[in-house]
Image: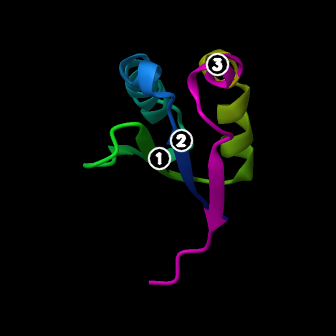
Amino acid sequence: MKINLTAILKSKPENIEELRHILLDMVDKSKSEKACIQYELHQDRNDKSLFIFHEVWENQVGFDLHNQQNYIQSFFQKSKSLLQEEPLLYFTNRIA
């Protein structure tokens, strides 16, 4: 079964550009993973500190493998100092 994820990240104001750079690198690397179907990054038009990922993974195994990648683990550690709050994660089922 496909994994659909929306992740919302809120950067500290002083870290917006650094976080943006890291997230763009994550997009490039994630898109090359075999199980990645969709991996999009959005930035709010009005609040530049707000980033939103829309991800679709082939299955749970592929998603779990993604989360084990060194660059993702590195981001999990570094994000603690870059983000204002814990990321919000929404796992959904596409209905239309």
Q: Neighbour class for label 3 at 10 Å: few (<14), some, many (≥20)?
A: few
The span from disc 1 to disc 2 (Cα, nearest Å) is: 8 Å
**Left or right position of 90 against 19:** right
**Left or right position of 44 against 49:** left
- Closer to the chain start, of discs 1 and 2, is 2
The span from disc 2 to disc 3 (Cα, nearest Å) is: 13 Å
- Closer to the chain start, of discs 2 and 3, is 2
The residue range painted magenta reads 77-96
Residue 87 lies within the magenta run: yes
Helix, strand, or loop for circle 3?
A: helix
Residue 3 lies within the magenta run: no
**Left or right position of 31 against 44:** right
Q: Neighbour class for label 1 at 10 Å: few (<14), some, many (≥20)?
A: some
Q: Is residue 34 visible?
A: yes
**Of residues 20 and 67, which is closer to you in this image?**
20
**Of residues 20 and 33, which is closer to you in this image?**
20
Q: Which residue is mark 3?
A: 81
Mark 1 vs mark 3, foreground winner is 3
**Colour scheme shown:** rainbow
Vertical placement of residue 65 versus 35, above or below:
above
Quarter of the rendering occupied by the N terminus: bottom right
The span from disc 1 to disc 3 (Cα, nearest Å) is: 19 Å
**For the point 53% across and 41% down, which residue is it?**
9
Q: Neighbour class for label 2 at 10 Å: few (<14), some, many (≥20)?
A: many
Q: Which mark is residue 9?
A: 2
Residue 96 in the image, given as x and y percentages of width and height: 44, 84
